[in-house]
Amino acid sequence: MPIPNDLPKLHRTSAKNQVLSLLQDWITDGTLQPGEKIIDAELAQTIGVSRTPIREALQILETQGFVEMKPGKETRITPLKPEDAHDIYLPLTSLEVLATELAAKQINEHKIQTLEKLNQDFIKAVHSQNPHSILEMDRRFHQMIIDTAKNPYISSFTHVLHLHIKRYELFYFEHAKGIIEESIKDHHEIIESFKSQDHERAKKYMQKNWTRAFHEVTSNLQNNVSSSK
């Protein structure tokens, strides 16, 4: 596993949470590839902890859908599949549309200005052509709306879903550049809808934003699966 060597020393009391966060990052940024086999003893030695927090973190990652565990046999990173993408994009889209509706009812001028700044940062990231920066700036824009909605359950549920989405969109970024320019326009329309207090219009463009991404990613994923047969 080609993972970093210069890792910070982990504190024993929070080792499980730190290992969990570290593995989530490695899975979502592609350090650990879909289908790759995970060896807990090797991870423990590399990270500098005992096997216990590794196993505990892997159990959580299994419930979150990031790894597949076969007790006594092996643990692998969950592969990227079209049917799983549907199960991830559908609830995330619904939750973000709901968050947009809730945010629209309490958003203020300061937060609108912040969204405009975040969309400008997103545009700069697009021009840099750095996939990680593009996805991070896009996430910050959407997270601002989720935070404005002030619903802890939406915030909690979307957090894990966004991690899954990052895996799909980062892995297929080279095949999905067509959605980026449209996303900039969607963000602009959402901001303008907030300004005019047009809640339905804001929801419509949030729906379009995620639906387009879903179709683009799954189409390329299906093409990849077909070409590998």
Image (cartoon, helix red, strand yellow):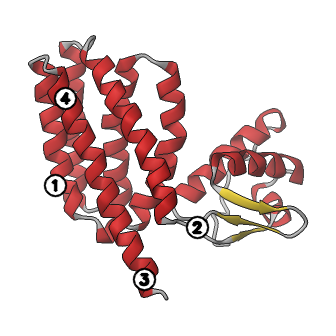
In this rendering, position of residue 170 left or right of residue 157: left
Q: Label 2, label 1: how many angstroms apart (C-alpha)?
A: 28 Å
Q: Earlier in the sequence, mark 1 or mark 3?
A: 1
Q: Secondary structure at mark 4?
A: helix
| Type of amino acid under label 4 | Ala
**Residue that mark 4 sits on:** 202
**Residue that mark 3 sits on:** 226
In this rendering, position of residue 185 left or right of residue 139: left
**Residue that mark 1 sits on:** 181
For residue 111, the mark is none
Q: Secondary structure at mark 3?
A: helix
Q: Label 4, label 2: how many angstroms apart (C-alpha)?
A: 34 Å
Q: Are marks 3 and 4 in contact (CB under 8 Å)?
A: no
Height in image: 128 above or below 87? Answer: below
Height in image: 55 above or below 152? Answer: below
Q: Earlier in the sequence, mark 3 or mark 4?
A: 4
Q: Label 3, label 4: how many angstroms apart (C-alpha)?
A: 36 Å
| Type of amino acid under label 1 | Glu
Crowd tier of the residue under label 3, counting other residues whose Cα lies within 10 Å: few below 14, some 14–19, many 20 or above? few
Residue 76, percent from left and from top: 71, 66
Height in image: 137 above or below 155? Answer: below
Residue 13 in view: yes
Residue occupying the point 57% across, 52% down? 25
Quadrant for residue 96, please give it: top left
Q: Earlier in the sequence, mark 1 or mark 4?
A: 1
For residue 79, the mark is 2
